Image (cartoon, rainbow, N blue to C red):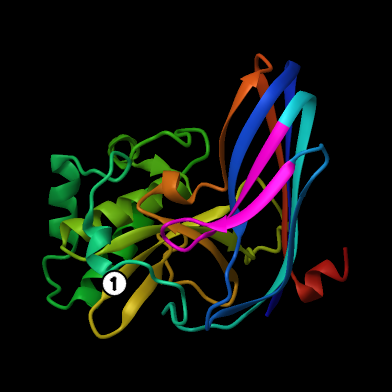
């Protein structure tokens, strides 16, 4: 499948910013399940854009802006050819041993209730892959998808208390509970061609990967109760959202900030009819 992505993020400020630095993790790498045909990152203001890699091998761009700037747009466009690998990741850049991803973070830390939940839903499974699929099915069944209940700073504990959240929250829950089972797991950010045919989306997608001895890294999308298919574009990974966030940065001046996101994710037949 060929997938086209057009992602625009626009910032507006009360008054011009004097300077800003933004770290972007918005560029995918090729692996056995996806080939990046072409990709472009640009902005509509004067600035320096430097490409690099972070410690986990994610492609990064650092944007340096000298003001005054009152409005700023980041435009990311590209096309990726994908294959269905049954959720298994092959040919990806790996900088560290899997055990690094047993490390707990504030966003993925478990409450006593979550530890009990993970033990309960996997109690009748002895094999790691079976445990992970049981966890996937349980979270998909028991956690309600809701865009109104959480934000980007919400921890897995808080989202689990309300039994609701967005894909970021479900990914954090899955990652934390997998680590509770002593299975290395990590957060993944990327894009998804939706089955319902909706092309314009509010935000990028998120899921998890867990390491299974003998298989390697396997993807699990608790939001949709499935392993990634050719409909997914994998962009960045981290111990949690903070390590894979599309944009993080700081600025000097500007007052209040308003951010608007436009995202269009389409497979080739769909975008040709737009």
Provide the secondary structure element on which disc 1 rests.
strand
Q: Which residue is denoted by mark 1 in the rendering? A: 211
Q: Is residue 157 above or below residue 223?
A: above
Tell me where residue 206 appears, x and y as whole percent.
49, 55
Task: Label the magenta part by its dominant secondary structure.
Answer: strand
Q: Is residue 61 magenta?
A: yes
Q: Which residue, as the protein is rendered here, is positioned at the far right? A: 273
Instruction: Between residue 88 and residue 135, name the one nearer to us.
Output: 88
Residue found at x 45% / y 48%? 168
Tell me where residue 158 appears, x and y as whole percent.
31, 34
Other residues around mark 1 within 10 Å, as few (<14) / some (14–19) / many (≥20): many
Q: In which quarter of the image is the C terminus?
A: bottom right
Residue found at x 12% / y 71%? 124
Residue 4 in sight here: no
Q: In this view, does 98 lie to the left or right of 193?
A: left
Instruction: Between residue 270 and residue 107, name the one nearer to us.
Output: 107
Q: In this view, does 62 lie above or below 178?
A: above
Q: What residue range appears in magenta?
A: 48-65
Residue 101 in sight here: yes
Q: In this view, does 184 lie to the left or right of 51?
A: left
Q: In this view, does 176 lie above or below 34?
A: above
Tell me where residue 74 appears, x and y as whole percent.
74, 44
In which quarter of the view is residue 271 placed? bottom right
Residue found at x 23% / y 76%? 130
């Amino acid at each position: 499948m060929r997938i086209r992505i057009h992602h625009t993020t626009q910032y507006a400020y009360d008054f011009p910013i004097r300077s800003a630095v933004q770290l972007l993790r918005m560029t995918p790498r090729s692996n056995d399940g996806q080939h990046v045909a072409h990709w472009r990152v640009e902005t509509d203001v004067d600035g320096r854009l430097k490409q690099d890699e972070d410690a986990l091998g994610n492609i990064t761009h650092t944007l340096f802006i000298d003001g005054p700037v009152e409005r700023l747009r980041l435009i990311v466009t590209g096309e990726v050819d994908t294959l269905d690998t049954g959720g298994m990741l092959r040919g990806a850049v790996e900088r560290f041993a899997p055990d690094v991803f047993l490390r707990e973070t504030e966003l993925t830390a478990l409450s006593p209730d979550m530890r009990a939940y993970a033990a309960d839903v996997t109690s009748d499974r002895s094999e790691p892959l079976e445990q992970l699929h049981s966890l996937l099915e349980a979270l998909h069944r028991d956690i309600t998808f809701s865009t109104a209940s959480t934000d980007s700073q919400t921890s897995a504990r808080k989202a689990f208390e309300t039994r609701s959240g967005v894909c970021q929250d479900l990914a954090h829950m899955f990652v934390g509970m997998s680590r509770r089972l002593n299975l290395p797991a990590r957060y993944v950010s990327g894009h998804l061609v939706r089955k319902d045919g909706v092309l314009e989306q509010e935000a990028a997608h998120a899921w998890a990967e867990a390491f299974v001895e003998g298989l390697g890294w396997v993807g699990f999308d608790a939001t949709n109760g499935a392993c990634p298919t050719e409909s997914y574009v994998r962009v960045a990974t981290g111990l949690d959202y903070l390590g894979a966030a599309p944009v993080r940065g700081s600025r000097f001046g500007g007052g209040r900030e308003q951010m608007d996101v436009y995202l269009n994710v389409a497979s080739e037949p769909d975008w040709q009819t737009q």
